[in-house]
Amino acid sequence: MKYAPIPKELFIKNRENFAKLLKPKSIAIFHSNDVMPTNADGTMGFRQNNDLFYLSGIDQEETVLIIAPDFPDPKFREILFVRETSELIAIWEGAKLTKPQATEASGIKNIQWTDRFLPMLQILLSECDNIYLNANEHTRAVVEVETRDARFVKYCKDRFPLHNYVRVAPLMHNLRAIKSEKEIELMQHACDITEKGFRRVLKFTKPGVLEYEIEAEFAHEFIRNAGNFAYPPIIASGANACVLHYVENNQPCKDGDVILLDVGAGYANYAADMTRSIPVNGRFTPRQRQVYDAVLRVMRESTKMLVTGNLWDEYHKEVGKIMESELIGLGLLDKNEVAKQNPDNPLYKKYFMHGTSHFLGLDVHDVGNKYRRFEPGMVFTCEPGIYIPEEGLGIRLENNILITENGNSDLMATIPVEAEEIEEIMNSK
């Protein structure tokens, strides 16, 4: 991995917190993600299962973690199985973790090779009543490829049908929603790398550049700072900005247009998620500035509501009222029509059709429960936008907000967002 080693104390603490949530006489089993194929003998870049990483810090394929807090023999209460290196693997892929290296990364003393997992499983399950198994239960997940977790669920229920099976996902969603001090530090680092990329792009952008050339500038800065793209970047100029998940990034940037940049760096598997909208030629037109300032005002007011005790649906309802007022001011909505609107289908959604915030962490759209009141340690995006296809204009602004005991903290506070500052940087020598 390119990133600096993470102290194992983070993962030790995460496992301690997780173990407290298990029923008596339980075992929890976590698998790494598969290495996914492309074509012929090609493979995609490996991305670790975030729950396994959260609990172990291991960023390697064919890894299995077992947590069994009540097991009679203490040395079997935490076991990490990792892939053994052979001479062939060392030559073609590079050596995998040694047992001492796996212990140093995870804090787990009992390290076994992966081929010992199934033989040991039968011994372990003889002393357990409850088996906690994992699955992707994100509310927006579309899972069409069978995962290693899914295959193991089938195996386990067939081989051990009389045990009690329990979903581990709700426990992980509960734990991962609250970020520790070290996690916040890693997320801040991802935000800092994102800022470097954005400042580079502000100096680079001019009429005639292609969207993918801007993408390349971000890539250069992210990689040279030991990061990567946390998600496929959106570089959407002109009317492309009205396509919410535009990822083609292949059009020329025209004089007089605005570019929407939804780009975040990933660092140590943690994500930043930034959106900025900048003028191709370095100057907003009066109408572009009018819409830009409206979005910025909504962002500022929305950020104020990301505080302890608020609730997801109530927050978004209040943001809708603020946006409604701004759209009336822009001449996009009629206040008399708004007064008669269906409250279940408000008119502002024509120009602002997505949510304002989502959980952020190891996943860009991180796991969490929308019915849980906001608590210190949660990190949310704040990303209002106004999209006007008939004007070929889409503007969205997005920062990453940490909820604290006494309000919140903006992890992107130093990234330029005021229109004047963006224009000044773009026009400076």
Image (spheres, rainbow, N blue to C red):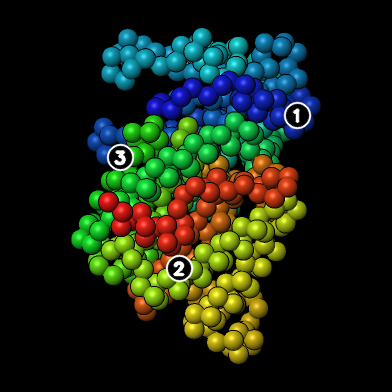
Cα distance between the residues tagged 1 and 2? 48 Å
Residue at image location 52% in from the left, 59% down from the top? 383
Q: Which residue is mark 2?
A: 292
**Label 2 close to label 3 by CB (< 8 Å):** no
218 or 59, which lies in front?
Answer: 218
Q: Earlier in the sequence, mark 1 or mark 3?
A: 1
Q: Earlier in the sequence, mark 1 or mark 2?
A: 1
Q: Is residue 215 left or right of residue 115?
A: left
User: Dividing the picture into quarters, in which one does residue 312 lie?
Assistant: bottom right
Q: Which residue is mark 3?
A: 220
**Tag 1: residue type?**
Lys
Whole-percent x and y of residue 119? 56, 15
Question: Quick one: SS at disc 2?
Answer: helix
Whole-percent x and y of residue 392? 34, 73
**Label 1 close to label 3 by CB (< 8 Å):** no
Residue at image location 23% in from the left, 62% down from the top? 207
Q: Is residue 254 left or right of residue 246?
A: left
**Tag 2: residue type?**
Tyr
Whole-percent x and y of residue 397? 48, 59
Q: Nearer the viewer, mark 1 or mark 3?
A: 3
Cα distance between the residues tagged 2 and 3? 28 Å
Whole-percent x and y of residue 178? 66, 40
Q: Is residue 111 left or right of residue 312?
A: left
Q: Is residue 91 above or below residue 372?
A: above
Mark 1 surroundings within 10 Å by alpha-carbon count, few (fewer than 14), some (14 through 19), many (20 or more): few
User: Dividing the picture into quarters, in which one does residue 26 lie?
Assistant: top right
Question: Quick one: SS at disc 1?
Answer: loop
